[in-house]
Amino acid sequence: MTDPIPSKNKLQGKVAIITGGASGLGEATARRFADHGARAIVIADVQDEKGQNVAASIGSNICTYFHCDVSDEEQVKTLVDSTVNAYGRLDIMFSNAGMGRATLTCEQTVLDIDLSAYDKIMSVNARGMVACVKHAAKAMIEGRVRGSIVCTASVMASTGCEKFIDYVMSKHAVVGLVRSASLQLGAYGIRVNCVSPGPVGTPLLKGLSGCENEELDKVCEPMSSLKGVLRPKHVADAVVFLASEDSEFVTGHNLAVDGGFRVIVH
C-alpha cells in the first residue's frame, strides 16, 4: 500500500481541464486544484472576461483560459486536443459546465414545458457532458493515462421536483452517463464519478431561485441537517477527492455533498 499523499499535494503534477470554470463550483475547484499542486489547469467557459480574470488570479504559470461552448462537440475536441498538445497529457477532466434554466417565461412544469428551452438545457447539461467524457477518455486512452473524469450532477438527480423538469432530467442523465462510462472505461484504469451538490450559492442557483446572496443563504440553510450553509469550497474539496489518488478504487459513484438534504427530502 502506498503512503498517503500529503494533504496539500494531492494533485501534484497533474494536468486538468475544468469546464464551467469561470465562476461558481468550477472557479472554486480551479483554486483548490492549484492549492493541491496541479501542474496545469485549463479553465474552459463561455464567460471570457471572468474566465481570464480567474486564470490570472490563480497564476498564468499554472492556469490558462480557453473559450469553449460544450454544446458544440468540435469545440470540446479542440479544448482537449490543445491541452494535450500544450502539456503532453490529460489527467483530470472536471466536466462541470451547466445551466439552471433556459427560459424565464415559465417554470418548466410538465404541463407547460417549453421544449425549445428543454433542448437548450439538455444540449449543455447532458450532451455537453457526453462530449467532455468522450474526448477526455479518448485522450487518456491514447496517452495511456489512468485518469479521473468527474462530472457535476445534482441532488435533483436522486429525486423529482415540482418545476424545472428539464433541469432535473438533465441531471438524471449525468448519473446515467457516469455509471455507464465507468463500466466501459474501467479496463483502461480510467475512473468516472460525479458529485451531486445540494443547494449551494452559485450563479446557477441564483438564476433558478431569483434570490441574491443573503436571501439565498436564508433559503438554503433549512435544507441541511448540518448547521451552516453549503459553499462552493465544500463541493470543490469533494472533487479534489474524486480527482486524486485518495479515491483510486472509486468509480461509477455519485457523491452527494448536500449536508443531509436528501435525507430531509426523503
Image (cartoon, grey):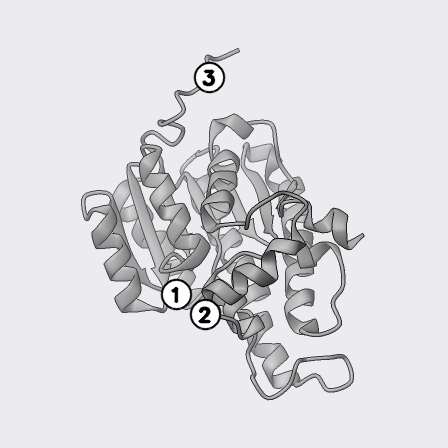
Percent from the top left, x then y, of residue 98? 51, 64
- Quadrant of the image occupied by residue 155: bottom right
Write down the quadrant of residue 199 in the picture: bottom right
Q: Which mark's residue is nearer the viewer, 1 or 3?
A: 3
Image mark for residue 4: 3
- Asked if residue 89 shows in the view, the reply is no
Horizontal side, residue 11 vs residue 189: left or right: left
In the rendered view, tell whether residue 22 sits above or below residue 184.
below
Residue 115 is situated, as x and y percent measured from the top left of the image, at: 66, 84
x 69%, y 57%: residue = 157
Q: Give coordinates of residue 71: x percent, y percent.
A: 48, 69
Where 130 sits versus 206, above or below?
Answer: above
Q: Residue 72 — which label? A: 2
Q: Which residue corresponds to the image point at 38% horizontal and 53% vertical from the top-left?
A: 27
Q: Residue at x 67, y 73 (%)?
A: 164
In the image, what residue type sits under mark 2?
Asp
Q: Nearer the viewer, residue 6 or 13?
A: 6
Query: How far is mark 3 from mark 2, CA to CA?
Result: 40 Å
**Which one is earlier in the sequence, the residue at label 3 or at label 2?**
3
Rendered view: 238 above or below 7: below
Residue 90, horizontal then vertical, whole percent: 38, 42
**Tag 3 and tag 2, C-beta contact below 8 Å:** no
- The local crowd at label 2, few if under 14, some if 14 to 19, many if 20 or more residues have their Cα within 10 Å, is some
Query: Of the residues shown, which amino acid type is indicated by label 1?
Result: Gln
Dot in front, 3 or 2: 3
Dot 2 lies on which element? loop
Q: Residue at x 52, y 71 (%)?
A: 211
Res 75 label: 1
- The answer to whether mark 2 and mark 1 are in CB contact below 8 A is yes
